[in-house]
Image (tube, helix red, strand yellow):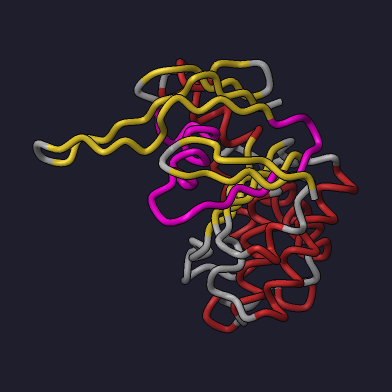
Amino acid sequence: MIRLINVHKIYQQGRNKITALAGLSLDIQKGEFAAVMGPSGSGKSTLLHLIGGLDRPTEGQVLVDGRIISQMVDDEATLFRRTRIGFVFQFFNLLPTLAAVENVMLPLILDGRSSSESNLRAKTLLERVGLEGRRDHLPEELSGGEMQRLAIARALAFNPPILLADEPTGNLDSKNGAAVLELLRQINTEQRCTVVMVTHNQEAAGYGDRIVHLRDGMIEEENPR
């Protein structure tokens, strides 16, 4: 499902070169829930961005669902991300002027779906994440946990086979964080959705099937749950 082969990522900052990934190779199987841990600067978010096609490696290959996403042209990569990969971020990235149902509808509308089809799909997803009673509320009217569940609903708009989560509980208290992690686990189990989650939290990482520890842009160790 996901394969990284000898991936290097180097960023240029002024005269300095910053190595984010240093020859990393990793396989993530279809339907797996992989948690990625490591100290700040270990390359966790860079790894997620490369898998999602948001960035390109300096060297090496990134294959997703059998396709080399790192070699796609921009338009091709955008379409691939839209339909095959869902993103969940620490800071939710919701549009503040749109109601919950409209936030979920938006990617579908942008894809050319009709308003009625998009509305029906959004309502189904809001029910899936337990927000059916909050669909007309603006993000500012929701709790942190509700906003993250809304973000997950939006990420599932196209029923993607892959879900990438970058510190999804980083802004939540322990109760709401646990609820979000349980939801991610349910989606992984019930929909056979491959989940790759970056986290600093050992307890959160325990929801995964495997924990991949990064340090200095390389895999330090891997542990099954």
Q: Residue 73's spot in the image, x, y percent?
A: 42, 18
**Residue that extends furthest to the front in the rendered view of this protein:** 220
Which residues, given as a range, are shown in magenta?
Answer: 28-56
Q: Which residue is pictured at 64% across the width and 57% down the height? A: 104
Question: Is 173 inside the magenta-drawn segment?
Answer: no
Left/right placement of residue 89 relative to residue 203 reads left
**Vertical order, 4 against 88 (above or below):** above
Q: Which residue is pictured at 41% across the width and 56% down the height? A: 40
Question: Is 50 inside the magenta-drawn segment?
Answer: yes
Picture quadrant of residue 71: top left
Picture quadrant of residue 175: bottom right
Q: Which residue is pictured at 78% across the width and 31% down the height? A: 30
Picture quadrant of residue 114: top right
Q: Residue 194's spot in the image, x, y percent?
A: 74, 39
**Vertical order, 181 against 4 (above or below):** below
Whether residue 129 is visible:
yes
Whether residue 108 is visible:
no
Left/right placement of residue 133 relative to residue 220 reads right
**Vertical order, 61 against 166 (above or below):** above
**Residue that extends furthest to the left in the rendered view of this protein:** 15
Q: Which image quarter is the N terminus in?
A: top right
Number of dots carrying numbers:
0
Left/right placement of residue 92 relative to residue 194 reads left
Left/right placement of residue 3 relative to residue 38 reads right
Q: Nearer the viewer, residue 28 or 188?
A: 28
Q: Which residue is pictured at 69% across the width and 38% down the height? A: 162
Q: Residue 186's spot in the image, x, y percent?
A: 85, 56
